[in-house]
Amino acid sequence: MNEKNSNFKEIASIALKLLVICSIVATIVASVNFITKDKIKYNEKLNTAEALTGIYYNDYNNSFTVSDDSFVITENDKVVLTCSQENFNFSSKDVKALYILKDADSKIHGYCVSVQPMGFKDYIKMLVAVNPDCTVKGVEIVSMSETSGIGTKAKEPSFLNKFKSLGYTQVKSEVDIISGATKTSKPVIDAVSASLYEVSEYIHYIGGEST
């Protein structure tokens, strides 16, 4: 009987020690996440600003910078173009955000859609820029972790440039899936199509017309 009690106490002591260790580790992980989450969020914004610049630099000869929850282009310390997020209910689960590009006079210069389809290995973070007439302005891959030399073919300009000037009904019929990288290139094609659809729905929502 005493031996059983001794074993029970030993097991209970080990379990208690493990519980304390797990609690300490959990606290450390939570603290690190709390400290780094703002930094991670800001880095994601920087990546988005870089993607916007990649698409629009030839139009404005300037780069986007982060300004609170928006992205802006400034000249002589004055904001000449703002890319700000709009509240809208999306039908596609892959679409995460819709941005509207407006100049200082509130004229709409275009739309941008943040979309994250699932690739072969992980989510592909993309930015799809859309012209006011609801055709593709440009597509940028913000980040992906697909297989090098295979899935990463989907972020090459030779593939992404195929989307330029295409409308919703043209994307899937005119952009071919990359042979050998189907599970990466098809989600990208579907994401561009979904982005155009959501922009079209938004334009109708605000009382405009889309093509």
Image (tube, helix red, strand yellow):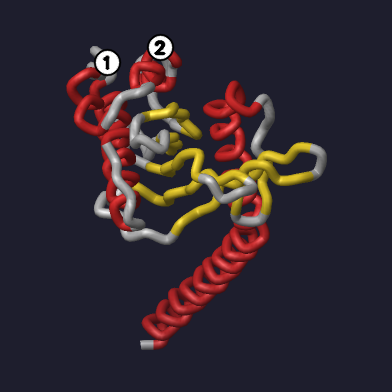
- Whether residue 40 can be seen here: no
| In this view, 122 is above or below 158 | below
Q: Is residue 120 left or right of residue 131?
A: left
Residue 116 location (% of width, % of height): 37, 42
Q: Quadrant of the N terminus?
A: bottom left
| In this view, 178 is above or below 7 | above
Q: Quadrant of the C terminus?
A: top left
| Residue count near mark 1 (Cα–Cα under 10 Å), binned few <14, some 14–19, many ≥20 | some
| In this view, 93 is above or below 81 | below
Give me the residue at 29% from left, 41% from top.
210
Determine whether the residue tagged by mark 1 lies in a helix, strand or loop: loop
What residue does disc 2 label? Answer: 158
Which of discs 1 and 2 lies nearer the camera? The answer is 2
- Whether residue 82 can be seen here: yes
Q: Is residue 185 left or right of residue 35?
A: left
Give me the residue at 37% from left, 39% from top.
123
Where on the picture, by quarter, is residue 146? top left
Q: Are marks 1 and 2 in contact (CB under 8 Å)?
A: no
What residue does disc 1 label? Answer: 178
Determine whether the residue tagged by mark 2 lies in a helix, strand or loop: helix
| In this view, 98 is above or below 153 | below
Give me the residue at 25% from left, 33% from top.
168
Count of numbered circles on the image: 2
Residue 114 location (% of width, % of height): 43, 43
**What type is the residue that disc 1 sits on?**
Ile
User: Which mark, residue 61?
Assistant: none
**What type is the residue that disc 2 sits on?**
Ser
Residue 64 location (% of width, % of height): 65, 37
Q: Residue 52 or 62: which is nearer the viewer?
A: 62
Marks 1/2: CA distance? Answer: 11 Å
